[in-house]
Amino acid sequence: MRKQAHPSYERRRGEPAIPENLDEFLTPQQRHGLRQVESFGWRLAFVRHPLFQEPTVVVARPGDNAYASITPDGDLEFDPLLAIRH
C-alpha cells in the first residue's frame, strides 16, 4: 500500500479532506487566521467536521510535520492531544 503525503479524502467516509464549500465551515475569524498563517508558510491540511460539534480546522507546516488547529476565534493553537493519522 502506497502512502500519500497529502491525502485528499477522509479515509473513513470518503469525504474530501478540504470541503469545496470551505467558507460554510469556517468562521470569519478562522478565514482571517488561515490567511495569516498561510503567509508564514503554513497550509490548510484538513477540516474535521464531526456531527453536532464545531469543525476543527487543521493546518500543517511543511518540512517539520508540525500541526496546529485554528480556533473559532482565529487563533493558532498547538494542541498536543490533536491526533493525526499518517
Image (cartoon, grey):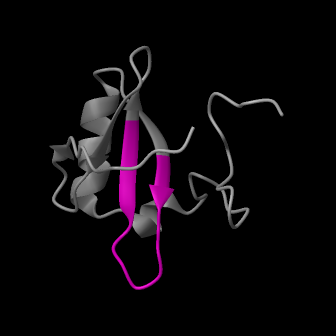
Q: Position of residue 56 (x, y in %)?
A: 36, 60
In the displayed orientation, state which residue is furthest to the right.
Answer: 1
To which quarter of the image does residue 33 belong? top left
- Classify residue 43 as left or right of residue 34: right
Name the residue: 57% across, 37% down: 86
Q: Position of residue 72 (x, y in %)?
A: 22, 62
Q: Is residue 50 magenta?
A: yes
Closer to us: 35 or 4: 4
Name the residue: 58% across, 58% down: 19
Name the residue: 40% across, 49% down: 83
Q: Is residue 76 magenta?
A: no
Q: Which residues are magenta?
A: 46-59
Q: Is residue 3 above or below residue 19?
A: above
To which quarter of the image does residue 80 belong? top left
- Classify residue 7 as left or right of residue 84: right
Q: Position of residue 18 (x, y in %)?
A: 56, 52
Closer to us: 55 or 19: 55
